[in-house]
Amino acid sequence: MTPHTDIAAIRLLGGHPALDFINTVDAWRDRWGPDFLVRYEDLVAWAERVDLVGAGLAAVLRTKAANAPAEAEAALMRARALRQSLHALFLSEAEAAPLNSDDAKQLNAILRQAGEHRELRQEAGSFHWAWRDEADLDAVLYRVAFEAADLLAARASRRDIRECHGVNCGWLFLDTSRSGRRLWCSEETCGTAMRVRRFRQKDRPEA
């Protein structure tokens, strides 16, 4: 849960870009929203913040979006749709519930598209994956899809994904705590708010 409404100011508490992307909705529990991805430019600003795109590509995407606003809006809607599916997939993991096959199919469909924009390159004697989608408005979508797929496939080598049960929250995060029993996306926000709420309920006189 965050008091900010600007994509450039929201807290990055997921511990992974795919989870931070899901958390671009202020609240998933108790109420939904508001949505921080209002414009395509918000999507680019977020991707630049989490280092999925560099400043050069971000500038290219902003220019193309300004010149093709309808296409940019469509790309934003595709990103929002992926976010909804990713939330369902990762929430199912957090709750150890069965996955929805439609959400998995959507992610796989985007991965197939994204795969056409990735290639193996050799630099300084070593190989690495690189992108060749500098003018594609779905560049952020493709990167998020691969980040999400990598996280889903790396279950054995990471800590559990949790859902914050703070009021008007529901953000997802990697539990990297020593005990593996972290409850809140942030102790300073949701953790404090929930403790204060419980104290007031406990201290409230019975009717």
Image (cartoon, rainbow, N blue to C red):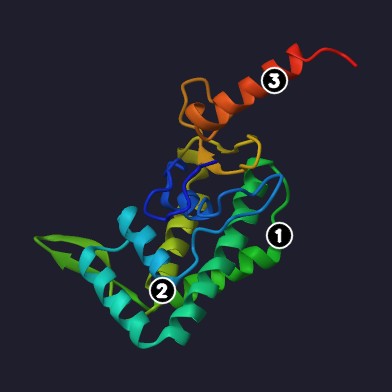
Q: Secondary structure at mark 1?
A: loop
Amino acid bearing label 2: Gly
Mark 2 and mark 1 in contact? Answer it, CB < 8 Å.
no
Residue tagged 3: 198
Amino acid at dot 3? Arg
Residue 181 visible within the image: no
Neighbour class for label 3 at 10 Å: few (<14), some, many (≥20)? Answer: few
Residue 163 occupies which quadrant of the picture? top right
Q: From mark 3 to mark 1, how far is it between C-alphas?
A: 35 Å
In the picture, measured across the screen, residue 117 lies left or right of residue 92, that is left
Give whichever of 188, 16 is nearer the camera: 188
Quarter of the image holding residue 71?
Answer: bottom left
Mark 2 lies on residue = 115
Mark 3–mark 1 contact, CB under 8 Å? no
Q: Identify residue for label 1.
A: 100
Q: Secondary structure at mark 3?
A: helix
Q: Nearer the viewer, mark 2 or mark 3?
A: 3
**Which quadrant of the figure contains the N terminus?**
top right
Q: Nearer the viewer, residue 120 or 40?
A: 40
Quadrant of the frame with the C terminus = top right
- Residue 199: x and y in percent read 68, 16
Mark 1 nearby-residue class (10 Å; few <14, some 14–19, many ≥20): few
Q: Give the x, y percent position of residue 155.
A: 52, 43
Q: Nearer the viewer, mark 3 or mark 1?
A: 3
Please report the residue visible at 58 percent of the width from the left and 58 percent of the height from the top: 86
